[in-house]
Image (cartoon, helix red, strand yellow):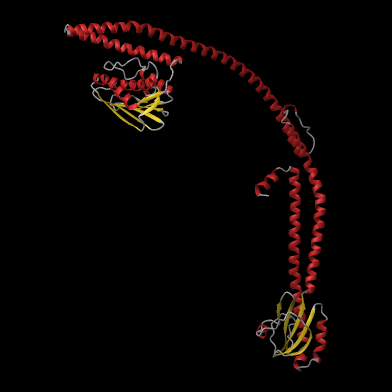
């Protein structure tokens, strides 16, 4: 099980189970630590004590072996050797002269240890030299010619050294004692653990039971909280919790009642506002429909007599030129120019009414971009000449033919060029067409007066005009509005960048499909 799964399993346990598990694990850990540390400490204490006993035995054996070493007589040392062998764990004793030659030995040992060469040097600072391995203790004690006045076996030896005694004590009894001690500690610890858990866990369960009951009540509160109450009995802490819970339920019930009343009031207001908005929407739609119908009707009615006026004006202009009446010809030309301007305004109103009424369809067909650009430049040339502007064009497309609505694309270009020429005098107007496999980009720039930043959004609204003066009367403010709506029909968009006195740049991007 991974650490995240283990944590998730712990989190899913009940509070009672967590507490009892925590108590059990704590006492189990305490028992394990106790069963480990106590034998270790006791073993160290017993080992030190047994080593000290061995030193005392070796020192006593050395004092009793003075005559045996002095006279090189094994008989004089037999009693001391047997007495020493009678101590528990002593498996080997030996009396040696100063040169290390054995005078008397009793018993044997199998670990093969021999005294080091510098043992005499080490015994100058202590009465007994101790070496131990896993099986035995080896004690080497000096035999002196004259016993020291100080009877402490570990006191430094100042008298003449005649020889040495070697005592070997087995650790077998120590291991058995350690095992018995460890077993006793483990048994006592486990009994203590069982007894403690037997007493503590039921007590803990009784203590937690009220909390669990309170938790169950809180869980039941999710279905109908306002009707649930808890009896205020039990320990003081639980009584406080129950009282707080009941007060909370009272507060929730009051708040729920007020929320229902407020919700009913809001629903009534929303229904009323919805009805009012629906009526306002219907009126707005009706007004828009009537406006579009009115514009279409008026434009149509104005268009017929206007065409007659243009026709008669053209005939009169030809007659005046034939009669070489220049003054009359100039006056008739002014009449025709005004009629053409009025004709363009009527055409814009008709287009706008069609777009708003949703009656303008998009027809996709193959369009030769370069030919269309040349046609638009030729149409816009007189507008540029009227304002003494130079008209430039550039064409850089990966594709020569694209699939789009030719008439609407042509009208977008003409509207932008017409707008640029109307607000530019003695300047430059430039049309730049670029495209790739997915998008057509049309950019019309001029060096005119520019558009203030606060006006750059409203210029796309119908019948909104900015920067209008006597020298540049402009039209009715429909050109850019129609251009934006045509861009929307072609799934494109239009943007403008302009600064006052620096001119303007209108950019149109239109997605294109393969031919």
Query: Which residue lies most toward the left here?
Result: 324
Q: Using the rendered image of the protein, determine whether residue 459 is visible from the camera's viewpoint.
A: no
Image height check: is 320 above or below 398?
above
- Residue at 69% across / 27% down in the picture? 252
Count how many numbered circles sit on residues in the image: 0
Looking at this view, is 296 or 117 the one in front?
296
Q: Quadrant of residue 60?
A: bottom right
| x then y, percent, for residue 74 | 79, 91
Q: Quadrant of the C terminus?
A: top left
Residue 214 in percent (x, y) is at: 76, 36
The vertical placement of 434 against 156, above or below, is above
- Work out whether residue 463 or residue 196 is closer to the camera in this orientation and state it: 463
Residue 180 seen anywhere in this rendered image of the structure: yes
Residue 143 in the image, given as x and y percentages of width and height: 73, 87
Looking at this view, is 24 or 446 the one in front?
A: 446
- The residue under the point 75% across, 48% down is 21
Front residue of 409 and 201: 409
The quadrant in which residue 491 appears is top left
Quarter of the image holding residue 270?
Answer: top right
Would residue 336 appear left or right of 14 to someone viewing this image? left
Which residue is located at x 70 percent, y 78 percent? 131
Question: Does residue 16 appear to the left or right of 283 in the view shown?
Answer: right
Task: Residue at the far bottom: name it.
Answer: 71
């Amino acid at each position: 099980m991974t650490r995240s799964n283990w944590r998730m399993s712990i989190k899913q346990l009940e509070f009672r189970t967590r507490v009892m598990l925590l108590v059990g694990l704590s006492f189990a850990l305490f028992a394990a630590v106790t069963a480990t540390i106590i034998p270790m400490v006791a073993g160290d204490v017993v080992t030190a004590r047994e080593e000290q006993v061995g030193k005392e035995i070796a020192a006593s054996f050395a004092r009793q072996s003075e005559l045996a070493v002095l006279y090189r007589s094994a008989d004089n040392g037999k009693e001391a050797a047997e007495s020493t062998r009678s101590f528990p764990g002593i498996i080997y004793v030996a009396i040696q002269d100063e040169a290390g030659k054995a005078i008397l030995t009793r018993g044997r040992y199998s670990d093969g240890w021999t005294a080091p060469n510098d043992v005499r040097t080490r015994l100058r600072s202590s009465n007994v030299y101790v070496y131990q391995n896993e099986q035995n203790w080896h004690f080497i004690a000096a035999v002196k010619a004259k016993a020291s006045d100080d009877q402490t076996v570990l006191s430094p030896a100042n008298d003449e050294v005649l020889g040495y005694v070697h005592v070997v004590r087995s650790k077998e009894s120590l291991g058995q004692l350690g095992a018995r001690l460890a077993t006793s500690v483990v048994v006592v610890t486990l009994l203590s653990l069982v007894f403690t858990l037997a007493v503590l866990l039921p007590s803990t369960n009784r203590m937690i039971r009220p909390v669990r009951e309170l938790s169950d009540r809180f869980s039941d509160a999710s279905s109908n909280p306002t009707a649930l109450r808890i009896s205020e009995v039990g320990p003081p802490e639980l009584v406080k919790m129950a009282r707080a819970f009941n007060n909370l339920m009272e507060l929730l019930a009051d708040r729920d009642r007020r929320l229902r009343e407020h919700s009913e009031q809001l629903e009534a207001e929303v229904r009323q506002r919805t009805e009012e908005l629906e009526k306002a929407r219907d009126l707005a739609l009706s007004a828009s429909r009537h406006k579009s119908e009115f514009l279409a009707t008026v434009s149509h009615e104005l268009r017929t007599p206007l065409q007659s006026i243009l026709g008669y004006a053209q005939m009169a202009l030809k007659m005046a030129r034939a009669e070489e009446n220049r003054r009359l010809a100039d006056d008739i030309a002014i009449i025709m120019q005004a009629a053409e301007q009025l004709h363009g305004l009527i055409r814009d109103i008709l287009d706008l009414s069609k777009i708003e009424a949703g009656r303008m369809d998009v027809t996709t067909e193959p369009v030769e971009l370069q030919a269309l650009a040349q046609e638009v430049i030729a149409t816009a040339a007189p507008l540029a000449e009227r304002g003494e502007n130079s008209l430039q064009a550039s064409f850089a497309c990966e594709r020569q033919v694209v699939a789009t609505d030719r008439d609407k694309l042509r009208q977008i270009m003409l509207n932008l060029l017409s707008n640029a020429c109307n607000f530019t005098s003695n300047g430059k107007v430039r049309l730049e067409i670029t495209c790739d496999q997915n998008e057509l980009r049309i950019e019309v720039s001029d060096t005119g007066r520019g558009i203030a930043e606060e006006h750059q959004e409203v210029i796309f609204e119908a019948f909104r005009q900015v920067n209008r003066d006597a020298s540049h009367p402009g039209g009715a403010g429909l050109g850019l509005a129609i251009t934006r709506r045509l861009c929307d029909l072609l799934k494109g968009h239009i943007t403008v960048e302009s600064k006052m006195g620096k001119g303007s740049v209108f950019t149109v991007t239109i997605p294109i499909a393969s031919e």
